[in-house]
Amino acid sequence: MHVALSSVRATAFDAVPTPAETLLSSRRHIDLQRVNSAVCPTA
């Protein structure tokens, strides 16, 4: 029962990202772009 509740809660959070999650994911995306441009300057 507890596992089902936690999975439902995780699904709900995945469906509706919080502003903090959006900030973190966008920052992570920017970091990935920086790493990619550093590794492959032509990309």
Image (cartoon, helix red, strand yellow):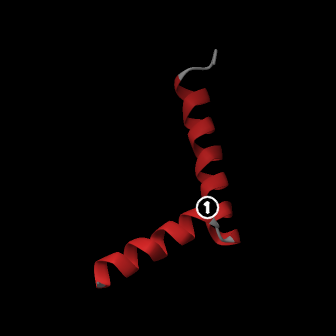
Q: Residue furthest top?
A: 42
Question: What percent of the width, then of the height, locates residue 16?
Answer: 64, 67
- In the displayed structure, 23 sits above or below 30; it is below
Q: Quadrant of residue 34?
A: top right
Determine the residue positioned at 64% across, 14% down: 42
Determine the residue positioned at 64% across, 54% down: 27
Determine the residue positioned at 47% across, 76% down: 9
Question: What percent of the width, then of the height, locates residue 23?
Answer: 68, 62
Instruction: Quadrant for the N terminus, please.
Output: bottom left
Q: Disc 1 marks which residue?
A: 24
10 or 40, which is in the foreground? 10
Instruction: Quadrant for the C terminus, please.
Output: top right
Q: Quadrant of residue 12?
A: bottom right
Determine the residue positioned at 39% across, 71% down: 7
20 or 16, which is in the foreground? 16
Question: What percent of the width, then of the height, locates residue 41?
Answer: 62, 20
Secondary structure type for disc 1: helix
Q: Amino acid at mark 1?
A: Leu
Question: What percent of the width, then of the height, locates residue 20?
Answer: 65, 71
